[in-house]
Amino acid sequence: MSSHPEVDMVSFTGSTRAGIEVAKNAAPTVKRVHQELGGKSPNIILDDADFQRAVGGGIASVMMNSGQSCNAPTRMLVPGARMDEVIAIAKAAAEAHTVGDPNGNHKMGPVVSETQWNKIQGLIQKGIDEGATLVTGGVGRPEGLDKGYYVKPTVFANVTNDMTIAKEEIFGPVVSILGYDTVDEAVTVGNDTEYGLAAYVSGGDQDAVRKVASKLRAGQVNLNGASPDMMAPFGGYKMSGNGREWGDHAFGEFLETKAILGYAPKVAAE
């Protein structure tokens, strides 16, 4: 479809790898390509934030859809001096997400396929091998489940941004917690990714939160757990795609502009 000469425009949502192939195939026909691709979104929690709310909310946001959300806040950046406190909150929050048959009384179901399950398992093992602290979860299925593509809600702490689990989009219920010493460092680490789909900032000082948000290279930034707004443009910087969905900005991707010169208006009848 993306290479067909009678297709004027392609809109694609999916992985960055697939998006690159769509764009390559579209290039010979010089068609417009709109893409909403992968993400590795930073979740910066400032020192004056409500940690129970911010950390717990961040964990819950990643576990939603079994971690299969492109804008999930999978890199949680917290003050290094409060790492132990964050670990305790994150562990409790993750372990509250029961896993099992969606028809039962569970918070989290399986991931989409065996291929994805295997990818997630490999990346969790990579996190262990590279020296991150496994707070909860880990490889294998949750206790009591011997079949199905179920993944343990997993949290790593003391992660550094050069680790695989901090760089690659896992697309599963895995959170990486990174410590920072200064807010400027948090912003630098937050932007140190090939992606730029979303970002999250929490703190008590609204001006400080807004200042951090303005420095993050992401298409949509959520402040203090704000509710989704379908009228706000959604899309990414860098390898997270191009163009925007939602709201008025979305229409422009599907329109062409025509200028007609010398088109005289009708003369009003006398």
Image (spheres, rainbow, N blue to C red):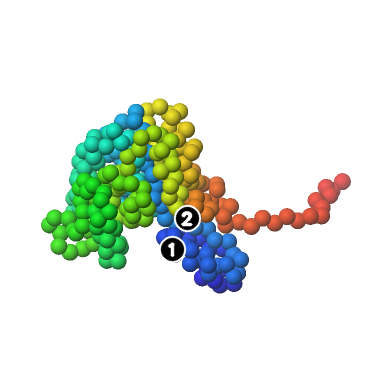
Query: Percent position (x, y) of residue 73?
Result: 36, 46
Q: Which of 217 and 25 lies nearest the eye of the viewer?
A: 217
In the image, residue 12 above or below residue 59? below
Q: Nearer the viewer, residue 245 or 270?
A: 245
| Residue most extreme to the left | 144
Residue that lies at the very extreme toward the right in this rendered image: 270
Q: Residues within 10 Å of mark 1 (few under 14, many from 20)?
A: few
Q: Position of residue 25 (x, y in %)?
A: 53, 69
Q: Earlier in the sequence, mark 1 or mark 2?
A: 1
Measured in 3D between alpha carbons, the distance from the residue under mark 1 to the one under mark 2, in whole angstroms, is 9 Å
Identified at 50% across, 50% down, the residue is 237
Badge 2: residue crowd in 10 Å (few <14, some 14–19, many ≥20): many
Q: Residue at x 43, y 47 (%)?
A: 192
Where is residue 36? Give x, y as percent.
46, 55
What's the mark number on residue 17? 1
Q: Which residue is mark 2?
A: 239
Helix, strand or loop at disc 2? helix
Q: Secondary structure at mark 1?
A: helix
Q: How many marks?
A: 2
Does any portion of residue 228 appear in the rendered image?
no
Residue type highlighted by circle 2: Met
Q: What kind of residue is marked 1? A: Arg
Asked whether residue 33 is in view, the answer is yes
Number of the label disc, if any, that sits on residue 49: none
